Image (tube, helix red, strand yellow):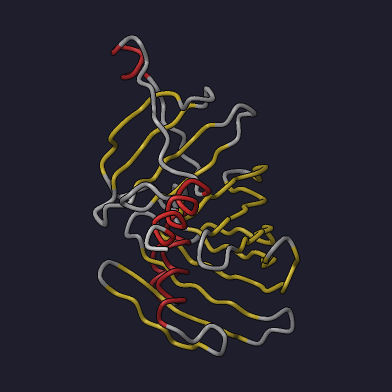
Amino acid sequence: MKGLPLLILIIFLSSCQTLPLINSPVSPANEKTLTCPSPFLKEKYRLVHAIETRVAGDTRSVIIGITLADPSTRFISCAIMTAEGMVLFEAESGPDMLKVNRALPPFDSMDFAKNMIEDIKLIFFAPEGKIQKKGNLPDGETACRYREESGDWIDVITDKSGGTTIKRYSSVGILKRQVKFNKTMGNIYQSIELQANETFNYSLLMTLIEAEPIKSELLQKE
């Protein structure tokens, strides 16, 4: 019986996706010329998405997400509302700042606010950490790996179909988030799917409703 917890831990870890090996190009010159995929915002935008929340493959709810994002300052203002227009959650974040302006159940925990802001950054902003490795994954996909200040690892991957995927791993290499980008409308992706690996796994399917580039002064007034 003493070995049972260890056995459970081994089974749990083996069932999780872990940080894969990235093979560097044979030629150092090829590594230097390898271009990292960059699905991130290049300018300030106001984005409106219809968001389907899925748990165990079943759609649990459909909400509207509104995001103001400035990649140059990493400022975010976001809101969640019902299709009827009721605001369920509203917050803003900048360097060393997180302010929750409104939060109704079940969105009223600080952990939810922190996780939501981190997910928005993962989707729309380039990693802040330094690039550690460029090359190919075992399946042949091109990947660039970054190490965040928190110790997390972020892989930005060009898959075999030409699409882009982001994977965020914990400091010990356990997959925490996976983001897949599909179809572009101008410089913005029409569909984004986020898979979260938590105690209870869930996924979000974000379908673009509206995308509007905005000027700095408009962002700061929001």
Image vertical order of residue 61 relative to residue 86, above or below:
above
Q: Residue furthest top?
A: 27
Q: Quadrant of residue 60?
A: bottom right
Q: Nearer the viewer, residue 43 or 56?
A: 56
- Residue at (42, 40) in percent of width and height: 155
Image vertical order of residue 51 relative to residue 109, above or below:
above
Image coordinates for residue 209, horizontal then vertical, percent: 69, 61
Image coordinates for residue 120, horizontal then vertical, percent: 47, 61
**Is residue 122 shown left or right of residue 48?**
left
How many numbered circles are shown?
0
Image coordinates for residue 160, horizontal then vertical, percent: 60, 26
In this orientation, does residue 49 appear?
Answer: yes
- Residue at (73, 60) in percent of width and height: 57
The quadrant of the rendering that contains the C terminus is bottom left
The quadrant of the rendering that contains the N terminus is bottom left
**Is residue 89 shown left or right of residue 74?**
right
- Residue at (50, 81) in percent of width and height: 90
In this orientation, does residue 215 appear?
Answer: no
- Residue at (63, 62) in percent of width and height: 204
Image coordinates for residue 147, horizontal then vertical, percent: 29, 45
Image vertical order of residue 120 relative to residue 147, above or below:
below
Q: Quadrant of residue 18?
A: top left
Q: Nearer the viewer, residue 85 or 54?
A: 54
